[in-house]
Structure formats: structure tokens, C-alpha cells
Amino acid sequence: RIAPPRARLNPATMSAIARRGIAAPATTLAPGAATRARRVKAMTSAGDGSRSRRSRVALGAGPRGLVLDVPRERPPPLASPRRSTRAAASADAIHAPPAEPERREEDDRRELTAAARRDGERVANEHDDPASRRVRYAYLAATVLATATAIAVSWLVAPTLPDAIVPLMPRGFDCLHWTAAPGAFVRFVDYYGTAVFAQAGCVTAGAAGMNFLGCLVLGCITAMGGGSFRGFVLGEQVFWAQEPEYVYISLAAAALTFFFWPALERRCEAAGKSEALESLLNWADALAIGGFCVIGANNGLRAAAGDPLVAVACGMFTASFGGIMRDTLCAKPARILHSHQEAYASCTSIGAATFVTLSALRVNPWVRCLAPIAVVVALRWLAWSKGLRLPTYGMRAK
């Protein structure tokens, strides 16, 4: 039993006792009470000497009993206010709803994808009659037959490489004399196709909401992406780094399109000539991809030692893979991979196969350059005017 108090402890002693884990009841402690309290504390402390927080417990009854601390569970450490604020801000940024512009862009992309899917279903339903299926499978058979003919003729005739390819094409302004040699004509069509593809890429980028830089970049990718991919396949250097005039043509065409094409579209729409403008673009694009497939097949024959299949593939890559890159960057379904759009890449593969076949037969260079372009233009006209398409997955021929 603790004796009644006979003296008050000074404030310094009280604060020291409180820091050590003991506290006075509310008034005073008797002499020797602090020593006894320390002994009780030593007996109730953990055996390993660890310092733990303790809860106060009153020993004895009455207002003069000691208040001693007893071990209790240590609460988890609290994070610093700065770290907690940062973590909360990061969590809010992750779980917060997207901003209004981002939400609109996401909605636009979903709408484009849904519209493409609806167009595909509509086209499949409209052209699912037996006659349309027969036309589609006949076109597929023609595509395969053209490539097989090119391979068979090349293997049977086995021409030498210098006789099978178009002579070296001039660069720069020498291509303006395109009637002088077939190589000059092919180079002229190549420059023309570069400008047309840059214009198409800029228009697509603008419709997707890109700024001036995005329109320039996408125009250049559309114009030179197919040839760059062909060079990658053949292990060649980047062609536009060795011939920078292609970069200048692409940038100029994309910049002019960015500033002047919207006004031209509005004027044509106001005058009721939108269909005429669209038809003009289709003809221009058909001529461009015809020239591209000839150039790609020609480079494939030269780089692959006359292999016909590689040449046909390079012709298709050059004419159509820039459009795949453009559609991918604009978050749109690739045009050449879906049959809700008319035939496109398959036309260029037939044109490239025609070039390889005529080259293997050692036909006049003018014929081997002009005939594939004419074939591609005719097939593209059938595609956008008559709905020529390849068969879709699950469609059966009856």
C-alpha cells in the first residue's frame, strides 16, 4: 500500500515522470511513489527491452491511486502529409474521369469504329445475293490467277535481269520529258503519286482532328510509307533519304492541302459539285497507285534477283501500305483489310503481276509500264462505281 502524500513534486519532475511513461494521478505523488512506479513499470515491460507505447491504467481505488502505463498494440505508422497528398493526387488522377477533349476524341474513335462495322454489315447484307457472291469469288480467282501466271511465266521463260526491268529512271526535272523514255514516265508518275498521297493523308489527318504538324507528318507517312516498308523488306536504305525530293514534294503538297483544301471543299459543296470532286480524286488516286505498283514491282525484280512473288508483293506494299499506316495513326479500320470498302490493294497486286509477266516475256518497255497502270485504273473504276470487292469471311459461293 502506498502511503498518503506528504509533499508535491515540482513541474520538472512531473514532466520527466510523464516522459518516462508514468503520470501522476491528478494532484500529487507521495515520496517514494516514483520509485515504486518505476519498479512496476520494469516488471510490466516487455522482456526483450523493446520500447512500446503504453496505455494508462489506474492502480488502486480512490482519487490518489497511481496511473501506470501498460503495453498496448502499436498503431501503424502514419505517412507524411506530403506523401499522403501526392498519393491521393495520383489516385485521383488515375480514377478521375477523362477530360472533356479526351472524352470527345474517345467518343469519336468509337463512333468511327462502330460506323465502319455498320457499313460492313450493310454491304454484306446488300450484296449477299448469289450474283454478288459469284462476282466476288470470280475477282478473287482473277487475283490468284494473275499472280500464278506471273510466277509460272517467270520460271518458264527465265529472262535475264537487265532485260526484265525498266531502265534507270531520271531524277529531278528531267522526268518532265516523260515522253523521251519509259523510265522518265515512271518517275513522273512517281512524283505525281507522292503529291496525291500526301494530299490524301493530310485530309484524313484533318478529319481526325490533328493540327498542322500532325497533318504534315501524316501526309509524309502516307506518301512515303509504302516505299519505306518496301525498302525495309528488301534490305535497302531509306529511299527518301537518298532522294530528298520526295520529302519536299510531300511537305509542299500537305501544306498546300492544309491551307487551301477546306475552302475548295466548301466551294464545291456550295456549287453542288462534291460528287465531281470525289470522282476526280478517285481517278487521280487510281493513276497514282498504278504508277506505285509498277515502281514497287520493278524494284522488287532488281533487288530480289528477279523473283516474281517478291516483286508482286513489293508492288502491293508500295501502293497500299502507306494507307495502312495512315488509317492506323488515325484510329480507323485499315481500308485494304475490310470489304466494306471497295477493292484497293488487290487491284495493285494484279497490276504488279501484270508488270512481272510482261517483263518476263520481254515486252516493249512502254507496254510493260503502261499496261499495268491501265489495268489498275480499270479495276479501281469497277471498284468505286460497281462495288467490286473481295469475299468476306463466312461468305460461301453458291
Image (spheres, rainbow, N blue to C red):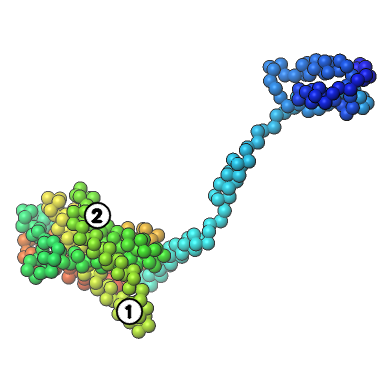
Q: Is residue 327 visible?
A: no
Which residue is farthest bottom? 271
Q: Is residue 238 visible?
A: yes
- Image spot of residue 123 (x, y percent): 38, 70
Instruction: Name the residue: 58% across, 50% down.
Output: 92
Instruction: Name the residue: 28% across, 73% down.
Output: 281
| Amino acid at dot 2 | Ser
- Frontmost of labels 1 and 2 is 2
In the rendered image, which quarter is residue 200 located in? bottom left
Residue 154, compared with residue 70, is above or below; it is below
Q: State which tag comes first along the sequence, 1 or 2.
A: 2
Element class at badge 2: helix
Comparing 317 with 175, the one in front is 175
Quadrant, the N terminus? top right
- Image spot of residue 126 (x, y percent): 38, 72
Q: Which mark is residue 275?
A: 1
Horizontal side, residue 311 vs residue 199: left or right: left
> Mark 2 = which residue?
228
Marks 1 and 2 sit apart, C-alpha to C-alpha, by: 33 Å
Instruction: Name the residue: 43% across, 67% down.
Output: 115
Instruction: Name the residue: 16% across, 67% down.
Output: 188
Give neighbour class at mark 2: few <14, some 14-19, many 20+ (Cα, 10 Å).
many
Horizontal side, residue 2 vs residue 310: left or right: right
- Image spot of residue 247 (x, y percent): 24, 60
